[in-house]
Image: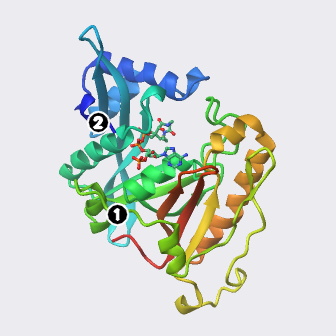
Amino acid sequence: MSQQKYHLRILSEPEEFSAVEALQRLVWPGNETEVVPAHLLIAAVKHGGLCIGAFITTDKESEQIVGFVFGLPGIYHTPDGPRLMHYSHMLGVHPDHRSEGLGFLLKRAQWQMVRKQGVDRITWTYDPLLSRNAHLNIAKLGAVCNTYHIDYYGVLRDGLNVGMPTDRFEVDWWVHSQRVNRRLSRQARQQLDLAHYLAAGAEIINPSGLRADGLPYPRPIRFPFDIQDSSLKAEDYPGLLLVEIPSDYLQIKVLDPNLALEWRLHSRQIFPVLFQHGYFVTDFIYLRGNPARSLYVLSHGDHTL
Ligand SMILES: CC(C)(COP(=O)(O)OP(=O)(O)OC[C@H]1O[C@@H](n2cnc3c(N)ncnc32)[C@H](O)[C@@H]1OP(=O)(O)O)[C@@H](O)C(=O)NCCC(=O)NCCS
C-alpha cells in the first residue's frame, strides 16, 4: 500500500468540483445524466455537505485528482424524534489507483469530519454483490447492515449498472462505536478468516458452484430455520451464518449477463429474509486465491456497538 503519495483535502473551489465531475465520468463511465454536476456539489457543501478529494502530484509538479467522497446531511427518525445523520452519496477512486487503500483513506477522512459535526451515524448504499466494496465497507470500515432495497434507483444508465436491477444494501456506520473506532485505529484489527468462523459454528447457507469456464454460479439456499415461522425465539436462530457472493461480479456482468441476473435474484431471496429474522451483516471474508471466494458474515441480534 503506497498511501503516502496521496494528499487529501476538503474541496471548496469551483474548479475542484469540475474536476470531481470529470473523475465521475471515469469511475462510472457511459452516461452523462448520471454525473452529479458541480453546481449541486457546491450547493450541498455550502449547506453542511462534505466533499473530500485525494490528489497525486504529477511529473510536471501539478496535481491530479484520483479519488473523492461526497455526502450531504440528512435526517433519520428515532422514537425520540428526528436526528441528524450524514448520507454518503458517492465514493470513487480512479481505476488506476484502486486497491491501494485510497477508498479507506477517503472514508476515514469523512469519518473524522462528520464526527466534528456532532453526528453519530453515516449511511450509504452499495451493490451487495460487489465484493471489493463489501470488503471495504464491512470488513475494513466496520459498517453494519440490516436493510436491503430492491431496485433502489430503478434504471441506472452508467456502465457499471446498466441493464441490472439496482438492488442495494443500506449500511450504517456508527461513527462513535467501538467497532468502528477499532477498525479505523492505526493498529489494524486482525481480520477473522473463514476458518475462525467455521470453528465458531458458522455455516455457509449457499455454497456456490463453479462452472467449467471458472465463473461461480448460485446453488440452492439452505436456511437453517423455518423461514415461514414467525414465532421463532432468539435461541432458535444460529448465531452466525455465512452467505457467499461472487468475488468478481463485474466480470460476470460482462461475460454472462444472465448469470449476473441469476446472482441478483438469488441474493434477493436471502438477505431480506435474514434481515427480517433479526440478522445483521457484521463482517466480510475475502479469500484471495484461484478461485477467490467472498462471504458475508451475518450475526443474529443487534450488532451496532
Ligand atoms: C469501491 C472503491 C471506491 C474502493 O476504492 P479502493 O481505493 O480500491 O479501496 P481500498 O483499496 O481502500 O479497499 C479495497 C479493498 O478491497 C480489496 N479487494 C480488491 N479486490 C477485491 C475483491 N474482488 N473482493 C474483495 N476485496 C477486494 C483490496 O485489496 C482492498 O483491501 P486491503 O486494503 O485489505 O488489501 C473503488 O473500487 C471504486 O471507485 N469503484 C467504482 C465505484 C464504486 O463502486 N463506488 C462505491 C459506491 S458509490
Amino acid type, label 1: Gln
| Crowding at mark 1 (Cα within 10 Å: few <14, some 14-19, many 20+) | few
Residue 44: x %, y % from top left = 34, 34
The residue positioned 61% from the left and 72% from the top of the image is 274
The residue positioned 52% from the left and 67% from the top of the image is 194
Pointers 2 and 1 in contact (C-beta within 8 Å): no
Which of pointers 2 and 1 lies earlier in the amino acid sequence?
2
Query: Where 249 sits versus 142, above or below?
Result: above
Q: What residue does disc 2 label?
A: 3
Residue 248: x %, y % from top left = 62, 44
| Residue 82 horizontal side relative to residue 135, left or right | left
| Crowding at mark 2 (Cα within 10 Å: few <14, some 14-19, many 20+) | few
Query: Where 275 sits versus 28, above or below?
Result: below
The residue positioned 70% from the left and 86% from the top of the image is 229
**Quadrant of the image for the N terminus?**
top left
Q: What residue does disc 1 label?
A: 190
Determine if residue 36 is in view: no
Residue 29: x %, y % from top left = 57, 24
The residue positioned 80% from the left and 44% from the top of the image is 258
Residue 75: x %, y % from top left = 37, 54
